[in-house]
Amino acid sequence: MKISAICRKRSIIVFFSFAILYLILLLNLFNIQILNQNFYLKLAHDQHTISITSYPDRAPIIDRNRKPITLNRDSVAAFILPHKLTEPQKLNSFLRKNFPDAYRRLAQHKNKYFMYVQRRLTPAQQALIKKTNLLDIKLVSEPSRFYLLETLAPVIGIASIDNQGLFGLERKYNQLLSGESSIFDLEKDARSGRFYFKKATTQTGTEGQELQLTIDSELQFLAASELQETVDTYSAQEGAVVILDPVAGDVLALVSAPSFDPNQVSKLDLNLTKNRPISETHELGSVMKPFVALAALEEGVVTPDELIDCGGKKEVMVDGMRITTVLPDGIIPFWQVITRSNNIGMVKVAKKLGPKLYDYYRKMGFGIKTNLGLEGEQAGFVSHPKNWSNRSIVSLSFGYEISATLLQLAQAMSLVANHGYLVTPRLILEPGQTPLVPSEVEGWLTKNSQSTKAKLTDSNSLAPKLLDHKTKRVFSEKTINQMRKILQENVQAGTGKKAYIQGYEIFGKTGTANLVVNGKYSKQHNIYSFVGFVERGSYKRVIAVYVKDSPQSGLLASMVAAPLFEKIAEKMIIHDKLLN
């Protein structure tokens, strides 16, 4: 009896002990499966699943002829694992001597799990690392961007070492070029780490899309070579070139000097990244006189043969204001006022226009961004009549109190080359977008050129294309024909004689302007410019150039910019197979 009671008591103790254990187990299961279900699901997922992100190749940038401007190619990077170095002293000695930047970073981050020594190693650096045979330095291949045309660097910009656009077109169109990454989940054996289950796509990526430019890469190179030679010859501070199709608005070359090597940017001077034809504005001087003349002829305040009294001196007083010019002229026809670049005659004509000159400058695109699609483009400045002083109309008559980019200057000259129609410059060819056929456009413009009110609303299939290029009429055919004769005469016998090319129709104007230094105009610091166009049949190309701030004295645009125009035009004619 006594033994039976003891056994029963023990059984009860055992029962309740197991009951408590099962209760604890049930509570733990409830905690795991109900209260903390998400936590343990994630823990299990992380143990059994790995996510892999796959990035598409960065899409290429190509020129108008589908020639590549950028490429993707593998580069070599060196890395270390600072938290588990096997030869720290040997490594430190090597880095201190050959990669001092990596040595300093390692000293500051000794416990990091991963650190690059350097990326995009040169062949010599790769050979050095392999020769030392350091166990702690590993080499890895990774994709990188390579640029084929250094002269386009300020336009294209660069992508980072991780293939993200930093500036220029690479940055503006980064999403288009880079596409979207794909993400895959791979299930694995948590213990062995071997993948043997399934692969699931959790995010479907997209390939990057190529970017096609209106630029002709060969023409860009030729223009850049001539510009750099001129800048070097005159030890100039900088220079720029724009080549524009005045019918389609296609920018064929956009050159800055000096520039930089986009494949070597470890020590990049930001001043060299400027896209000068659109980011630099200047008061350009006498190169603006044709545009004053266009306004005056259109308004009928003067005719090409009207005689203008220029005073017969280099310096005269006009309405109490002292006006100077380079050549002393007496009474000469207005067309000769332009070809001889006489400031006195231009002031007298501009005063007849008054505030209307401002309106015409704006109609020609000055003071307004071209919206080319590049970051850093400047609008320039045109002094508004409400802010004019007594001398403002004088300054505006020969290119002061108005600042412009070189692209704006080329766009304005397209008016004369394109029957008075102003087109919007474009740099990007959209998918499916094709250039206008010059002969078709020339025929349409000639047919509809007799009235300033000719509209792009007829049934002609060309009209919608012209509308796509935002073409608008600014000047009558009569005015344009008068200006063409003047600009052609200027190249044949005026200040632009050194731009002449035998056998071709060349039109253009020079400009020499003083630069502002310490708040004052300096005769020792100048900018020399030329804008004009080459024409043969339906073929037309506008070229605008400037060379800025040479230490050589006594220079004029007729000596610097006009010859540069001629050299570029000759190379362009050969390139475009326009030879006689």
Image (cartoon, rainbow, N blue to C red):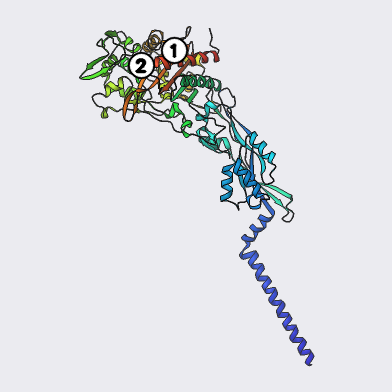
- Residue type, mark 2 in image: Pro
User: Badge 1, how many Cα within 10 Å: few under 14, some, many 20+?
Assistant: many
Left or right of residue 158: residue 236: left
Query: In the image, which disc is placed on residue 290?
Result: 2
In the rendered image, is residue 466 in sight?
A: no
Q: Residue at x 62, y 60 (%)?
A: 39
**Label 2 SS:** helix
Instruction: Tell me the residue that label 1 is attached to.
Output: 499
> Considering depth in this image, is 365 or 307 the residue closer to the camera?
307
Q: Quadrant of the N terminus?
A: bottom right
Left or right of residue 248: residue 23: right
Q: Where residue 410 appears, x then y in whole percent? A: 43, 21
Q: Where residue 250 appears, x then y in whole percent? A: 49, 22
**Label 1 SS:** helix
**How many angstroms separate mark 1 from mark 2 (CA)?**
16 Å
> Considering depth in this image, is 226 or 146 the residue closer to the camera?
226
- Above-or-below relation of 91 to 567: below
- Above-or-below relation of 32 to 449: below
Query: Disc 1 or 2, which lies upstream in sequence?
Result: 2
> Considering depth in this image, is 336 or 304 the residue closer to the camera?
336
- Residue type, mark 1 in image: Ala
- Above-or-below relation of 283 to 135: above
- Above-or-below relation of 526 to 13: above
Residue found farthest to the left? 320
Query: In the image, which disc is placed on residue 204?
Result: none
Left or right of residue 135: residue 171: left
